[in-house]
Amino acid sequence: METITSAQNPKIKNLLLLQEKSKARREQGLFVVEGRRELEHCIEAGYNVKTVFVCNEIAGQAGNDLCQAGNDLRHARPDRASQIIEIPEALYRKVAYRESTEGIIAEVEYKERKLSDLRLPENPLVMVLESVEKPGNLGAVLRSADAAGADAVLICDPLTDLYNPNLIRASIGAVFTVPTVACSSEEAVAFLQDRGIQILTAQLQDSSLYYDVDMRRGTALVMGTESTGLTDQWRKAASAHIRIPMLGHLDSLNVSVSAAILLFEAVRQRQI
């Protein structure tokens, strides 16, 4: 196992580059996962881990177990073995985004995610977000989608980087546990309509209360940004328009809160 102690080491510099620059992630086909739970979800989803940086002073037994697993894999499958690099606590705190990530940071190989790869069950529940780019909001919606057992999340914005470290952190790894695809709105509409999945758009105008709409059949819940809402493409494609009643002075909720309300209404209806 290699040990690195200097922040000037090229491997440490590249780790920081991958954390900060989406262009570097795309060019190298790598992204960064920080934290034991997040990395476990990533591995369970079938991703190949290239390099793991471990701070044993923080990771403790988890770090020792990881190193042993890496050694075992290296002997059993040399073609798939991850490189494990030990770093001291002072260096770890310089490269880690959070201090509460168990002393483990990994570089992981990209996997292309396409709509054609999705395998949906009968009467699926799909969450769709249009132009919601903030990693914190996306991560929170993914956590709700995981909790509600959603079958897929479609993020309709070609600029969205599903491997943004902030999105991975905010989702606590749910970006790996829920099939998630970034695509255009046009592609998403066609995908849903071809499969007979009803499209329910969340909007204030010309809408029904969300709990009055049947969500027991195959359903896609579609939400846009709080400021601009959804584009006309989604409004026209909708099977129905739904809204959450607003009884105070404000006319909207944070998108992650609204998504959770709608997702768990679908869960409620399907359990009756």
Image (spheres, helix red, strand yellow):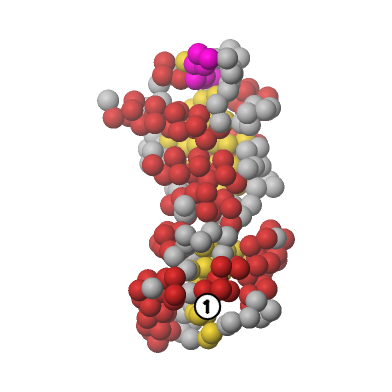
> Circle 1 is placed at which residue position?
88
The relative height of residue 122 versus residue 46 in the rendered view (above or below) is above
**Residue 16 locus on image (x, y percent):** 65, 67
Which residue in the rendered view is the most extreme toward the right? 23
Q: Residues within 10 Å of mark 1 (few under 14, many from 20)?
A: some
Residue nearer the viewer, 101 or 176: 101
Q: Residue at x 52, y 49 (%)?
A: 170
In the figure, residue 92 lies in which quadrant?
bottom right
User: What residue range appears in magenta?
Assistant: 241-248
- Report if residue 206 lies within the magenta region: no
**Residue 71 locus on image (x, y percent):** 40, 84
Q: Secondary structure at mark 1?
A: loop
- Report if residue 244 lies within the magenta region: yes
Which residue in the rendered view is the most extreme toward the left? 272
Residue nearer the viewer, 168 or 102: 102
Residue 110, can we see it?
no
In the figure, residue 65 lies in which quadrant?
bottom left
The amino acid beneath tag 1 is Pro
Q: Residue at x 52, y 53 (%)?
A: 169
Q: Residue at x 39, y 27 (%)?
A: 265
